[in-house]
Amino acid sequence: MPRTKGDHEARRRDVSEAVWRVLAAHGFGGLTMRAVAAELGATTGLLTHYFRTKRDLVAYALDLLERRTAARPRRTAGPGVSAVRAALLDILPLTDEATDSNRVWVSSWDTALADPELGADHARKYARSRDKLRDLIAEAQRLGELSPGDPARIAAGAQAFVLGLVVQALLDAPAFPPHRQVELLDDHLAALVPTPGG
């Protein structure tokens, strides 16, 4: 009996889930055709229908990571510092799902650094994230909730802070449990709030 489009789409979803499970467990260093095939309970030959090369698999995994990250529920907050705080909290590994996603992101850095095209794509993604943060910061400044200054520079510093906190939380979870991550972020934001009469 011929395979239908629905069969193909269902198989593609199965492949996506298998890729994600391998990434969450082993990172990009463990992402191989053989590992995905084993997770899928299939042969590597079947995977060649989806990925001709290991690089195709990696590019697909990076795209899958971005799509899953974009689809994750986000905190809602009003304008100003609350919106900046919510956007930064959404980056941190505060839940199991966010921890898995961050583990995959961090493991992707080595892959991106080794491939100029993938590296440039990563740089564009982080730049877009900074731009969104810059706009939130500019609005908070307009409302008088953050000190004056170049919002792009403040956004770059905030992004660098949370990404550094992500790495520490992943490497030493007992020292950086969720409540401590939130406290440290709040300390960082407090330093950006104008002081009365200042």
Image: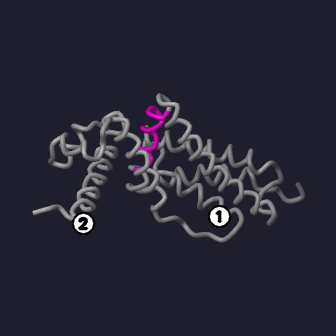
Residue bearing mark 2:
6
Q: Is residue 148 or residue 53 the one in the foreground? A: 53
Q: Position of residue 7 (x, y in %)?
A: 21, 63
Q: Nearer the viewer, mark 1 or mark 2?
A: 2
CB-based contact (under 8 Å), mark 1 and mark 2: no
Q: Quadrant of residue 97?
A: bottom left
Range of residues picked out in magenta: 101-112
Q: CA distance from mark 1 to mark 2?
A: 41 Å
Label 1: few (<14), some (14–19) or many (≥20) C-alpha neighbours in 10 Å: some
Q: Report the number of numbered marks.
A: 2
Query: Is residue 38 a member of the stretch shown in magenta?
Result: no
Residue at 59% over, 58% down = 87
Task: Give, as a three-letter code, the residue at label 1.
Answer: Ala
Per the rendering, the mark at residue 140 is: none
The residue depicted at 80 percent of the width and 48 percent of the height is 150
Q: Is residue 101 above or below residue 74?
A: above
Give the residue at mark 1. Answer: 83
- Quadrant containing the N terminus in the rendered view: bottom left
